[in-house]
């Protein structure tokens, strides 16, 4: 039978702004060659599960064990509510 579940753990998150400061903080690297193929930058966040693409305005979440992952801005804003 299908059941509904709510997450009980709090996460910390901040919105990625594409700055060098945030790139260094989270180990994100940019792909400058992407500008030749696309009209926007391409960023990669290394996670425990492998590389993950992250866009400016996406959120970078930090879990209970210090791990990071990217969450699309629209999904984050529909799923999470700020509590501080």
Image (spheres, rainbow, N blue to C red):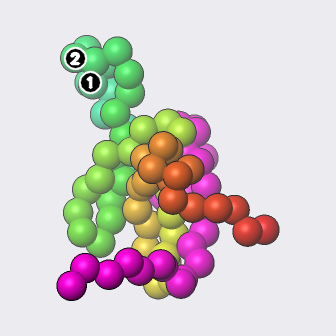
Q: In the rendered image, which quarter contains the C terminus?
A: bottom right
**Residue 52 in sight:** yes
Residue annotated with mark 1 = 33
Q: In the rendered image, which quarter contains the N terminus?
A: bottom left
**Front position in the image: 27 or 39:** 39
Instruction: Look at the picture and state if 50 lies above or below 63.
Output: above
Instruction: Look at the picture and state if 38 lies above or below 28.
Output: above
Residue occupying the point 50% across, 44% down: 73
44 relative position to 17: left or right: left
**Residue 24 in sight:** no
Q: Is residue 23 magenta?
A: yes
Q: Quadrant of residue 32?
A: top left
| Residue numbers of the magenta segment | 1-27
Instruction: Look at the picture and state if 76 lies above or below 20.
Output: below
Q: Is residue 13 magenta?
A: yes
How many marks can you see? 2
Q: Residue furthest right?
A: 84
6 relative position to 37: left or right: right
Given contact means CB atoms under 8 Å apart, are the residues at marks 1 and 2 in contact?
yes
Question: SS of the residue at dot 2?
Answer: helix
26 relative position to 50: left or right: right
Label at residue 4: none
Residue annotated with mark 2 = 37
The mark closer to the camera, 1 or 2, is 2
Q: Residue furthest front?
A: 1
Please provide percent x and percent y for residue 14: 61, 55
Residue occupying the point 54% across, 39% down: 57
Residue occupying the point 69% across, 62% down: 82
Q: Residues within 10 Å of mark 2 (few under 14, many from 20)?
A: few
């Amino acid at each position: 039978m299908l059941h509904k579940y709510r997450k009980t753990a709090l996460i910390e998150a901040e919105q990625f702004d594409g700055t060098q400061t945030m790139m260094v903080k989270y180990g994100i690297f940019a792909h400058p060659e992407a500008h030749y193929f696309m009209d926007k930058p391409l960023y990669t966040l290394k996670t425990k599960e492998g590389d993950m693409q992250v866009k400016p305005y996406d959120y970078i979440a930090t879990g209970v064990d210090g791990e990071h992952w990217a969450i699309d801005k629209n999904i984050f804003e529909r799923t999470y509510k700020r509590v501080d």
